[in-house]
Amino acid sequence: MTGIHIVGSGHTAFGRFDARSLEELIVEAAREALAEAGLPGTDIDAVYLGHFNAGMADDGFAASLIHQADDGLRFKPATRVENACASGSGALYAGMNAIRAGRAKRVLVVGVEKMTHRATPEVTKALASAGYQGDEAEAHLSFPQVFALAAKAYAERYGDPMVAMAKIASKNHKNALANPLAQMRRDLSFEQCNEITEKNPLIAPPLRLSDCSLISDGAAAVVLAGEPAAGQRTAHIRAAEQVSDYLPMSRRDLLLFEGPKRAVAQAYAAAGIGVQDVSFAEVHDCFTIAELLMYEALGLCGPGQGGRLLDEGTVYRGGKLPVNLSGGLKAKGHPVGATGVSMHALSYRQLTGQAGDIQIEAPELGVVINMGGAAVANYATVLEPGQV
């Protein structure tokens, strides 16, 4: 038991916001989280910002922009955390560690990214910097190409995953219809996701456009506390585990997803639970093949058996363990530094009955898996309802 609670959340819509600055996104999410927690900035002891950037943003010193949200935050220590697509969870875990160390009682964590003002090739290049640069073959791979290699390897080892991947894409788009914060609230049928068409072209064969997450702007925030105040809605962080693997893909078998599997197994052990106890999961579906492999990391199935879970309805809304009720990165959006915080913020809302149309009935445990790079930086969190 960590003894740390989420006591408030904030979340902008995800999408393309040409007229909104990085600062405006940070301020909106931070203010909402403070208001939901019922706390002024003066009651916050430290601030952490998850922000990948990699040349995408024009605001170079983003951590100190959080102070713009509340004058009471002035002089509070603010730190930017970068860990590729897991930057948001890295910031949240840093905030947890500050509380554990006795350096803070309450921490504000914000994740943010503004990406859509850059051309797609620029964003692709920036994201690719999270891959291994010490090997010429890997350094030239974009992330769609990396996960295309995973899909090809999956086909060779277990059988063609493309039908399962199309089902994942369609599922997550249907889930996003109920999430007003999602970037792409468009119902895409299995047939639309499974076919290669002018509207659904190949991006990195065999990956289709519908297999890829979105380029997004947005921010999310949570307030962490060691001791919740009376009247606060809370979700207790029952376990939180980080596992980091080798960066070079040549040193590991990507299909085994060993980093995510270890992080989840350690989180289950720390929480004293098994996968059968989990009510819902938010997982890192940067590409649909990643969600398919995440089913194995969750312990829902053995290697190569993820398609069966889709056929049986296990991971759908109403199934035994719904995955990505928010729409996931695939349809909710993927503003890189915000993603990990978003996963935790929306899980907090699920567990406190504040999730709106994506709410499920009486969830008891939620699991978050946020991943940086190709299964390199892996964060697995188990959350449960606290006081309501």
Image (cartoon, rainbow, N blue to C red):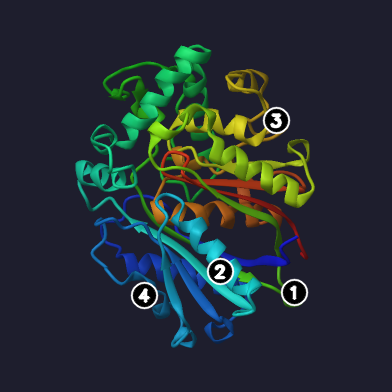
Disc 2 crowd, CA 10 A, few/some/many (<14, 14-19, 20+): many
Q: CA distance from mark 4 to mark 1?
A: 29 Å
Q: CA distance from mark 1 to mark 2?
A: 22 Å
Q: Counting residues from the N terminus, which is met first, the one under dot 3 or under dot 1?
A: 1
Residue 68 visible here: yes
Q: Amino acid at mark 4?
A: Leu
Q: Counting residues from the N terminus, which is met first, the one under dot 4 or under dot 1?
A: 4
Q: Amino acid at mark 2?
A: Gly
Q: CA distance from mark 4 to mark 2?
A: 17 Å
Q: CA distance from mark 3 to mark 2?
A: 33 Å
Q: CA distance from mark 4 to mark 3?
A: 41 Å
The image quadrant of residue 25 is bottom left
Q: Counting residues from the N terminus, which is met first, the one under dot 4 or under dot 3?
A: 4
Residue at 52 percent of width and 40 percent of height: 327
Q: Position of residue 345 (x, y in %)?
A: 57, 57
Residue at mark 3:
319
The quarter of the picture where the N terminus appears is: bottom right
Nearest the camera: 239 or 349? 239
Disc 3 crowd, CA 10 A, few/some/many (<14, 14-19, 20+): some
Q: Amino acid at mark 1?
A: Gly
In the depicted structure, whether residue 92 falls above or below residue 123: below
**CB within 8 Å, label 3 to label 2:** no
Residue at mark 2:
95
The image quadrant of residue 12 is bottom left
